[in-house]
Image (cartoon, rainbow, N blue to C red):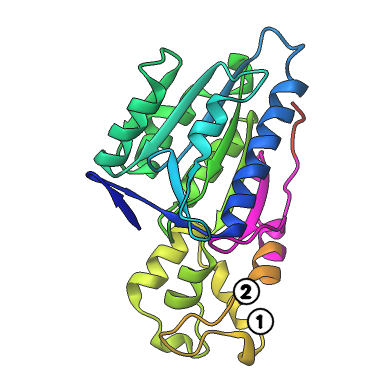
Amino acid sequence: MTTVGSVQFDEIGHWSELKLEIVEKYGAAYTTALSNARNLKKIYIDGYSGAGVHVSRRTGVQVEGSPARALKVSPPFDGFYFIDMDASRTAHLKTLCRDRSDVVILTGDANVELTKEVLPKIHFRKFNRALCLLDPYGLHLDWEVMQLAGQSQAVDMFLNFPVMDMNRNAIWKYPAGVPQDGVERMTRFWGDESWKKVADNLPLHRRHHSHRPRGRVCHGAAGRSLRGRPRCGGRVSCCAGACAIGLLATASCRSI
């Protein structure tokens, strides 16, 4: 973390910078693809927006976050929802948005804000479409969010798997020792307890066996299992790990 005034900016590595570039380019491609559908309102959603600015771990230079990049996409989105639990971050984000009428900034739990405030407004019958970025800091995202987004049949989602938190607190070599909090958070993220079967099928040498994170152990298994889940109706691109880029699974549905 780098603190400027009262705001803590996340320090990010090269892969996170690349991830931001990919999301920005995808956003431009997304709005371009829908530019001829004049009756469709195009919405950008960021469930873990941060302050809109990061600091490069390599150079120490400030790097634009996903909200700042989304605001510059051309053709533009018609509306934006940015969410973060940290009031100092959302306050800084408001200064970047300069009271734009097309931006809604919410301070609170992304699970609550998305399921109660944002996603109920998105549905293909309402003639809107949304690009949703979910890049949680850890196992803090509930399956209900992904399910609701899918059921709308109107959301394209980038989901970043919090693999380090999974490794540290859920997928252990000896499951009996996993902390109950880790089990509960993993189950809320996964939607049910089928993740335990996936973990049981991993070779022992690839499971986390201590309190130290040991690499990314559930990439392939997580991707295969997600493809096997009941379809929730949306398209999901999964990036593995806190900063790694890789499309693990794509659940296709109704085309936009």
Residue 103 left/right relative to 109 = right
Inspect the image, locate mark 2, and give the three-letter code of the amino acid beneath it: Val
Q: Is residue 243 magenta?
A: yes
Stretch of the chain drawn in magenta: 224-252
Residue 230 appears anywhere in the view: no
- Badge 1: few (under 14), some or many (20 or more) residues near its Cα, within 10 Å? few
Q: Are marks 1 and 2 in contact (CB under 8 Å)?
A: yes
* Image position of 85 with respect to 204: above or below: above
Q: Which mark is residue 198?
A: 2
Question: Residue 205 at x, y = what percent?
Answer: 63, 92
Residue 203 lies in what quarter of the image? bottom right
* Image position of 194 with respect to 43: above or below: below
**Residue sitting at x 54%, y 60%:** 13
Q: Which mark is residue 235?
A: none
**Residue sitting at x 62%, y 61%:** 244
Inspect the image, locate mark 1, and give the three-letter code of the amino acid beneath it: Asn
Q: Which residue is mark 1?
A: 201
